[in-house]
Amino acid sequence: MRKNGVQALLMGGQACVFYGAAEFSRDLDLLILVDAANLARLRQALDELDAQPIAVPPFAQQFLEAGHAIHFRCRRPDVAGLRIDLMARLRGMGGFEELWQRRTTIETETQAIDLLGLEDLVCAKKSQRDKHWPMIRRLVEQHYFQHRNEPTPGQIRFWLRELRTARLLLSVVEVWPLETDREVGQRPAVSAAIGGSEERVAEHLELEEKQERDRDRLYWQPLRRELEELQRGMR
């Protein structure tokens, strides 16, 4: 992808590894910019990887813009079996250009890797999939333990909005009351933490998860119907 100049952001399990929340993943999940030039570069990269579509929908701009994921399997010997999942839109989030501005770039020994920003990655993980919720918790906790000694106001706000461990949320509310006052109306779990009840905080966190799962289910319903129609048409 780098070799061909594809503008893309790494997300999914491999991005979580870079953020210190290890997750074993054989897949390569990319958020891509959809325009004619970038799609041409992307097609060239996929051709060089001998990557073939493995499910509906087919590789077409209209499906990417609609929010579908497009799946490939690589056949080139050195990457044989690697699955590549491409998306151009994420539920409840801004467009690619906005997410690109908030990206994290990590320098490795061989190249720079552009990742979906941490806050955006956490939002992208809020889905119906059971495995995503422990990963969200690990991502935010890792960030908290890394920066809690000298946090910025923005980092504290991030923890107040996204921490999923009742005990840690109670700690943040206790240590940073001024930032808490600014966020208290945005999240019922924070209001419960001010009262000091870990049990009440846990109840609100559980309700939050259920609501996000429901929102994700509703978002994907029309897209799943479209996929089912495409599958029937192919048969």
Image (cartoon, rainbow, N blue to C red):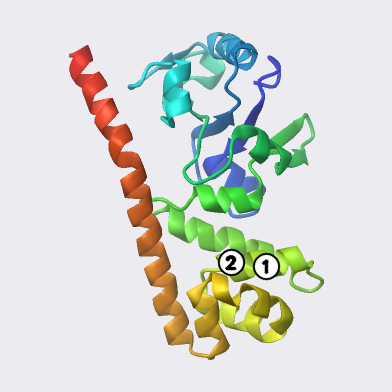
Q: How crowded is mark 2: few (under 14 residues within 10 Å), some or many (20 or more)?
A: some
The residues bearing labels 1 and 2 have C-alpha atoms spaced at a distance of 6 Å
194 or 234, nearer to the observer? 194
Q: Quadrant of the N terminus?
A: top right
Q: Which of 197 and 109 is in front in this view?
A: 197
User: CB under 8 Å between callouts 1 and 2?
Assistant: yes
Q: In this view, does 147 lie above or below 199?
A: above
Percent position of residue 28, x then y: 53, 32
Residue in view at x 71 percent, y 34 percent: 113
Q: What residue type is labelled 1?
A: Arg
Q: Which residue is drawn at 51% across and 34% down?
A: 89
* Residue at (67% x, 24% y) in the render: 7
60 lies left or right of 3? left
Which numbered disc covers residue 161?
2
x 66%, y 46%: residue: 117
43, 156: nearer the viewer: 156
Give the image location of residue 83, x and y in percent: 46, 27
Nearer to me, 189 or 149: 189
Question: What amino acid is found at the position of numbered circle 2 in the picture?
Answer: Arg
